[in-house]
Image: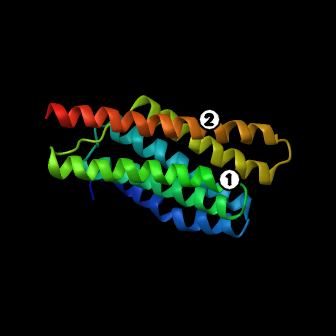
Amino acid sequence: MRCRDIPNLITAGRILLVLPTCLALLHRDYSLALTLFAVAGLSDGIDGFLAKHYDWTSRLGALMDPLADKALLVTSYAAITWTGLLPVWLFVLIILRDAVIVGGAVVYNFRVARLEAAPTLVSKLNTLLQILLVLLVILGQVITWVQAWWVTLLVYAVAVTTLWSGIDYVVTWSRRARRA
């Protein structure tokens, strides 16, 4: 093992946290779920820092890192929706957006040119808001000072940025495909 493999190993560890986090949410063990989600978040920051700071980047890492993040978020949203803490329509909206993006990326990669994934600013904002919503929902089950209106506000903010980022990806990559 080389030092430059450390970020990928950390990312692999984050992928291994997906199932226990999901099970903790489904079993309503919110303290454990919060701990696991926090560890996953910290590991994401650490592997990103190591990869960028020491130039330990790789194509594998560039693919695994967003996959790990997406797996954790999607399973967390599925579990939280299943337990009735989030509306089904929001989960469906998030899944539809991701399906459109992945489908478009596959078509672009195989029909137009090799895809080099680059998240847009609005997509990064959407991901941040999705993470904050999961944290706030879980925190609301662990501590009592989380106000319901905060969750409601974040639900609609996530919905707006999900639609916005989905449209942004379709428009941006359609333009690139036409130019290619």
**Residue 82 at least partly seen:** yes
For disc 2, the marked residue is 157
Marker disc for residue 141: none
Assess disc 1: are there few (<14), some (14-19) or many (≥20) residues with their C-alpha within 10 Å of its C-alpha: some
99 or 67: which is nearer to us? 99
Does 114 sit left or right of 136 as displayed?
Answer: left
User: Which residue lies at the image location 48% right of the left edge and 65% below the top edge?
Assistant: 16
Does 131 sit left or right of 117 as displayed?
Answer: right
Way the structure is coloured? rainbow
| Mark 1: amino acid | Pro
Marker disc for residue 87: 1
User: Which residue lies at the image location 37% right of the left edge and 47% below the top edge?
Assistant: 101
| Mark 2: amino acid | Ala
SS category of the residue bearing label 2: helix
Q: Position of residue 168 (x, y in %)?
A: 39, 33
Q: Earlier in the sequence, mark 2 or mark 1?
A: 1
Q: Point out the image quarter for the C terminus.
A: top left
The image quadrant of residue 15 is bottom left
Distance of label 2 from label 1 (alpha carbons): 14 Å
80 or 138: which is nearer to us? 80
68 or 8: which is nearer to us? 68
Q: Position of residue 156 (x, y in %)?
A: 65, 38
SS category of the residue bearing label 1: loop
34 or 151: which is nearer to us? 151
Q: Position of residue 34 (x, y in %)?
A: 67, 54
**Residue 119 at least partly seen:** no
